[in-house]
Image (tube, helix red, strand yellow):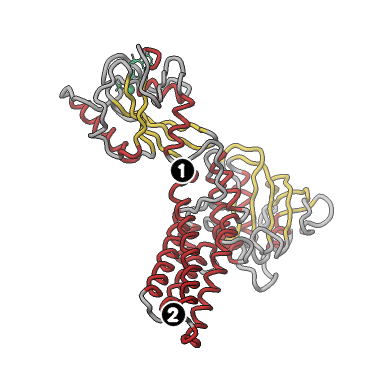
Amino acid sequence: MNDCIAGGGPERQADLIAAISTATGPGAVCVVRLSGQGVREALGCVFEAARGPVGRPREMVYGKLVHPKTGEMIDRAMAVFFPAPRSFTGEDTAEIFGHGGSTIPRLILEAVMAAGARLANPGEFTQRAFLNDRLSLDQAEAVADLVAAQGEAEAALAARHLEGALSAKIKPLVDRAVALQAELVAILDFEEEWDEGARAKTMGALEGLHSEIQTLVGIGKNLRVFRDGLRLVLTGLPNAGKSSLFNALLGRDRALVSPRPGTTRDYLEATVSWDGLRVELVDTAGLGARSGDELEGLGQEMALRELGEADVIVRLRSVTDPGPEGTGAFPGADKILTVWSKADLRAGPLPDGSIAVSALTGEGLGELKLAALEKVGVAPGLAPEIVPNLRQRMALEEAGDSIGQALRALTDLMPPDIAALEVAAALGSLNRITGRAYTDDVLAQVFANFCVGK
Ligand SMILES: Nc1nc2c(ncn2[C@@H]2O[C@H](COP(=O)(O)OP(=O)(O)OP(=O)(O)O)[C@@H](O)[C@H]2O)c(=O)[nH]1
Ligand SMILES: [Mg+2]
């Protein structure tokens, strides 16, 4: 048995952490990851390579895993060592590939902890990668998004952010803010030379910067569905065919359908994928004249609440019983997409530009999807390069506000150092996005969303 106290290694490495990086439960293989000071020693304590030593850089080795204290064999496994700085965290790192399931991963983890590691906090590997400059903060967030992605659109977006697409947009804005700030500070010494023309030029540059920041804010707001998915709520009179359409869009009979009005009481949710985009379909109780039935009333209240949560409200009007034309009582008028239902029963033509669907024949379902996506600004095939998340968007909004203040200061003919201070504030906000400037609070907020082992 080896002498098993991990330690040594370059000064700059943080303490040794370990975690199971794969999901628990049935699975052929698990990965236990280690990072920090003493990785190589700890690996030597738990892993007996079949041939040659373990710990040659980036070389996968086959061998036997043993508990360092008892010497008991745990598993046959593979292990690989990544020396600092060319590793995910930038520190010495190792990965052990053992068998999966509910027990072996835990035993491997216990063994590496007996060899001197402590259990990693959520996101601690990625946090170290950020602190060691392996990733920017927006890239670190993309790691979590990639793991959490539900559907191809979310995954593709996270992959682009991981490649640094957002940093690439922020960097030139930062450069321009730096230049503008320097210019405004320099003017202090030559204020007499700062004539109307020079002032107008600086203001033009600030306006350009402001509008680009606003564009990114707008993308974050308008294309939010690429991160959060789209919540589509079906509403209409009782019997309008909501549950039938819900089933047709889902491709299976999930909701009860009957010719009796007031069939649906509780709301029903189901997730589908449209063009890789996650769509939450919600079927609700019909809205309309109440029969006085208590449950019907409760169902309608619930339906109204759901309308408030919707990104798109599909309001069905049956061709056989359309009810009133207006949408007066509905909250969220701008989210409403009016759609004719039971199109197979129509007697004559419908008004121009109407969307008509039939749950029975499947007519119009494709059109309905396109129109719903268009309602939230998603054109067919749209794959946005970036969509700032809420944290990033708030920082962008703050940056935009500061640039706006700088412009106001110059418009009001205040001294240029006032504007310079505002530009500096904007710079701070922009730098928070990529993590060039950060506080412990921001790190805690970002990495709280991670799982252990990432
Ligand atoms: N011909 C035809 N009948 C339909 C279509 N959609 C629904 N129906 C019929 O209309 C009746 C009501 O359908 P539902 O889907 O239960 O309507 P709903 O809007 O969910 O009704 P409530 O839950 O009671 O508010 C049922 O008898 C359905 O078979 C359609 O596209 N074509
Ligand atoms: Mg129903």
Q: Is residue 93 left or right of residue 225?
A: right
| Nearest the eye: 100 or 240 | 240
| Residue 329 coordinates in the image, percent (x, y) | 23, 34
Of residues 168 and 18, which is closer to you in this image?
168
Going by the picture, which residue comes out furthest to the right? 52
Q: Amino acid at mark 1?
A: Val
Instruction: Give the percent coordinates (x, y) of residue 68.
Output: 68, 57
Q: Is mark 2 within 8 Å of ligand 1?
A: no
Q: Sequence order check: which comes first, mark 1 or mark 2?
A: 1
Density class for disc 2 (Cα within 10 Å; few <14, some 14-19, many ≥20) is many
Q: Residues within 10 Å of mark 1 (few under 14, many from 20)?
A: many
Expressed as whole percent of the image width and height from the top left, the position of residue 145 reads 53, 49
Dividing the picture into quadrants, the one containing residue 287 is top left
> Is 208 left or right of 259, judged from the image as shown?
right
Is label 1 in a helix, a strand or a loop?
helix
Q: Tell me what residue is drawn at x 51 percent, y 33 percent.
A: 273
Percent x, y of residue 157: 56, 46
Q: Which residue is mark 1?
A: 225
Q: Is residue 288 above or below residue 136?
A: above
Residue at 71 percent across and 59 percent down: it is 45
Instruction: For residue 119, say whether it is visible.
Output: no
23 and 65: which is toward the camera: 23
Ligand 2 rendered quadrant: top left
Look at 72% across and 46% down and name the residue there: 77
Q: Does 104 appear above or below 9?
A: above
Q: Which residue position holds label 2?
A: 416
Q: Amino acid at mark 2?
A: Pro
